[in-house]
Image (cartoon, rainbow, N blue to C red):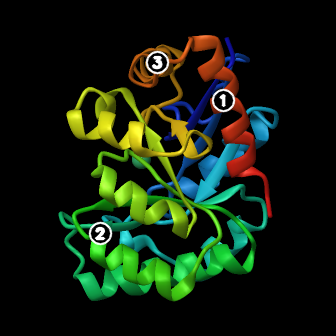
Amino acid sequence: MFLCDAHCHLPSSEFSEISDALAVCAACAKGSDMPMLAKFKEENPKNVFAAFGVHPKYLDSFNEGELAFFLENADAVGEIGFDKHSSFDLQFQRACFEKQLGMAISKNLPVVIHEVGHWNELEASLKRLRPKRFLIHAAKCSAELVEKFEPMGGWFSFGERELELKSGGAALAAASRSRILLESDSVPSPEKMEKAYLRASEILNLKEVELCRMIGENFSEFFKNG
Ligand SMILES: [Zn+2]
């Protein structure tokens, strides 16, 4: 089976190859990840998609010029967003999020969003800037939030961790099938993805082969540029 991981991080070794049975979107957390991610993509041109951006916990490493440089060869902007556990205040988080979101919009790139605890702020920023396509990763939000964000261009990605929770299962069931992706949020790992696929197929009551086809199509659609 061919599995697609919508959100993972860099492998421990810079030049690792990944399994042919896996396509991944690897995301940056901070500025120092960017050159390593560019190399990882270069080494695995067929099955590594790259999201460049700065996570709300590492905003001291945000450098607009550096990000603009790496966005020249990016498949997405991310992971960016809000986090109530970040040491940066909300105003600064918002400024950095909106700056990066604006860069994504001007390059016509999809956005991978990290969101912990500031849903109203996220909603307000998305309404202000209106990106066409964004992915809320590790989505364990309520079904109501899925229904609110989907018409705004929202897609939702779930890992085994979220799908073990009642809220994650409810969010998965509430999302349109064409807006669902699966993820590991770890280093690229077919084993972790197999567990997420299995759990999602149980919740959605879909055969794994059908789920594989659906997630594969959704992955291509989300990460296509434009
Ligand atoms: Zn992540």
Q: Nearer the viewer, mark 1 or mark 3?
A: 3
Q: Amino acid at mark 3?
A: Asn
Residue drawn at 43 percent across, 82 percent down: 125
Q: Is the residue marked by circle 1 packed among few (<14), some (14-19), or many (20+) residues within 10 Å?
A: some
Instruction: Tell me: 130 left or right of 172.
Output: right
User: In the rendered structure, which disc, 1 or 3, sits on the residue that comes first in sequence?
Assistant: 3
Regarding mark 3 in the picture, which secondary structure is present there? loop
Q: Residue at x 54, y 50 (%)?
A: 27
Q: Amino acid at mark 2?
A: Trp
Q: Which residue is mark 3?
A: 205
Of labels 2 and 3, earlier in sequence is 2
Between the C-alphas of marks 2 and 1, the distance is 28 Å
Seen from the viewer's position, the closer of residues 98 and 214 is: 214
Classify residue 86 by image quadrant: bottom left
Image quadrant holding the N terminus, namely top right
Q: Which of the labelled discs sits on residue 53, or is there none? A: none
> Residue beneath label 1, please?
214
Question: How far separated are the C-alphas under marks 2 and 3?
Answer: 29 Å
Give the spatial CA distance, label 1 vs label 3: 13 Å
Q: How many dots with numbers?
A: 3
Residue 23 visible? The answer is: no
Asked where in the image residue 71 lies, by quadrant, the reply is: bottom right
Q: Residue at x 64, y 18 (%)?
A: 210
**Residue highlighted by disc 2:** 119
Q: Position of residue 60 (x, y in %)?
A: 36, 75
In the image: residue 50, left or right of residue 194:
right
